Image: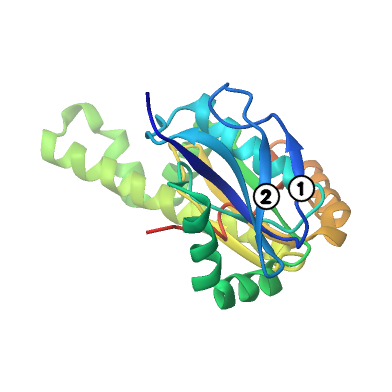
Amino acid sequence: MSHIGKYIYCIIEEKYDRNFGTIGIGNRKDLVTTLCYNGISAVISDTPMSKYVINKANLTAHEMVIEHVMKDYTVLPVRFCTIASNLEEIRSLIRRRYPEFKGLFRDMDNKVEMGLKVVWKDMDAIFGEISASSKIIKKIKSNISGLDRDIKIKAGKQVQKALAEKKQDEGQIITRKLNRISVDIKENKIMGDSMLLNLACLIDRTHEKEFDNTINDLAAEYENRFFLKYVGPIPPFNFVNIEVT
């Protein structure tokens, strides 16, 4: 039987013991509670001392606990599958990194994350615009069947370069508007030709409605151009991810 350790979900400012219910990771109905040191608490539950597989179910369970705690607190998320062997190890962690955590609480006070993905709706139209705006690409495409392999590869690279530039130009239009209401914005990896933005926006809780209105205005303005999908508010996963070594 595996030794039972303590799974750490996040760090909060709390000087009293809290009980968040039997919502622990691993479908074991483990109780999620707190361990406090000098006004800072780790949100924890019992768990076997073994690695959790990185899959949707486990990641969702980890994040759902933090989202539940976020309803009442500013949270500092801890990296997935951070397990301490005992309570003293957690006290030592908080004691050792106390100034760092206090600084992060100042930075993240009343902050939440909003995620936004922006995708072009009509890629045929986008590639058509690229071809129309580039004499080189237009010339190559007009005689594509008679070209050798190297020139076709070069043509493909020209198209991808033009596509990247178009993503940057059009993405900046949206990012500039979000900058006005965001404390910070991080650009995450984009996937495929059609996605031009994958943003994590850190905002103050008091600006949630303004953010929502801004997204709705953008969606209406670019109804025929972009599909906008956003999630939030969620914990600031892209801005705080405490690692324990």
Residue 96 visible somewhere in the drawing: yes
SS for callout 1: loop
Q: Quadrant where the N terminus lies?
A: top left
Does 148 sit left or right of 236 as displayed? Answer: left
Residue that carries the numbered disc 1 in the rendered image: 18
Q: How many marks?
A: 2
- 193 up-or-down from 163: above or below: above
Q: Quadrant where the C terminus lies?
A: bottom left
Residue that carries the numbered disc 2 in the rendered image: 34
Q: Quadrant of residue 51?
A: top left
Residue 225 visible somewhere in the drawing: no
Residue drawn 80% across the image and 54% down it: 211
Task: Identify the amino acid type marked 2.
Answer: Thr
Mark 1–mark 2 CB contact (< 8 Å): yes
Task: Identify the amino acid type marked 1.
Answer: Arg
Does 179 sit left or right of 100 as displayed? Answer: right
Residue drawn 86% across the image and 50% down it: 213
Expressed as whole percent of the image width and height from the top left, the position of residue 4 reads: 46, 35
